[in-house]
Image (cartoon, helix red, strand yellow):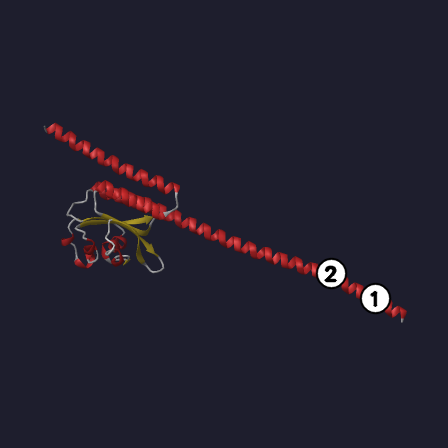
Amino acid sequence: RRLYRELTIQHEELKKRTEELSTLCEVDRISTRTLDLDEVMNSGLNKLLEVTGADSGDVYLLDEKSGELILKGQKGLSPEVVPLIERLKIGGGVAGVAVQQRSPVIINDIEKAPRSMTVYTRKTGAKSLVSVPIKVRDRVVGVLDLVSHTLRTFSKEEVELLNSLANQIGVAVENARLYENLKQTNLELQKRLKELEEFYDLAVGRELRMIELKKEIEKLREKLKTLEGNG
């Protein structure tokens, strides 16, 4: 019986590791074929909740202009709660603290966490949660949250999965940013090219008019000479 239990536990662990790997592979497959951040985030959240059995998850991205975290994707949150947590300040809420500390924040029992940190999180019905910063190289660009409505202890493997998924989202964020920059540069170059083409056409037109004007002047001079000669 003991051997059977050990084999069963090992089988379950192997099954879970396989599901986690499948999740990362699926998100990686999507992120390599599309620049649609929403698709990448929603796919990641769906697979994350499926594998971990958590009740909800969300993704915030940092708005560099306002310095706030903006909710960009979520699964499992009630519609009434979403407006309350759409924007967070860095250092505010569990997600904001994770960004400020640049490291995961794990809360296995929300009642034991500072109320000032969890005031909005409590409104979501969370009992346990973990927040992991999304990084691009050495920059923090957002945060990924996983929430349970019942008390649970997040395993080391689950936090590692969350970290890996956050890294994949970070790559997708950077790819989307580079694409937007490239698209903007392309638009600016097209605009400049059009301006130069219009200027060129205008310059050529003026040159042609100058040539015609010079010919008219020469004709008039010839006529004047003829008139003066006849006079």
Vertical position of residue 80 compared to residue 172: above or below: below
Task: Look at mark 1 in the image and give the residue it sits on.
Answer: 223
Tell me what residue is drawn at x 83 percent, y 65 percent: 222
Q: Separation of disc 2 and disc 1 at Cα? A: 17 Å
Task: Look at mark 2 in the image and give the residue it sits on.
Answer: 212
Element assignment for label 2: helix
Count of marks, rendered view: 2
Quarter placement of the N terminus: top left
| Position of residue 111 in the picture relative to residue 174 (left or right) | left
Q: Nearer the viewer, residue 43 or 183?
A: 43
Q: Is residue 26 visible?
A: yes
Within 10 Å of the Cα at label 2, are there few (<14), some (14-19), or many (20+) other Cα atoms?
Answer: few
| Position of residue 24 in the picture relative to residue 226 (left or right) | left
Q: Can residue 145 be seen in this view?
A: no
Vertical position of residue 138 compared to residue 11: above or below: below
Q: Where is residue 85 in the image (x, y as percent from the top left)?
A: 26, 57
Element assignment for label 1: helix
Tell me what residue is drawn at x 27 percent, y 53 percent: 99
Give the amino acid type for the residue marked by disc 2 in the picture.
Glu
Q: Where is residue 209 in the image (x, y as percent from the top left)?
A: 70, 61
Tell me what residue is drawn at x 21 percent, y 54 percent: 124
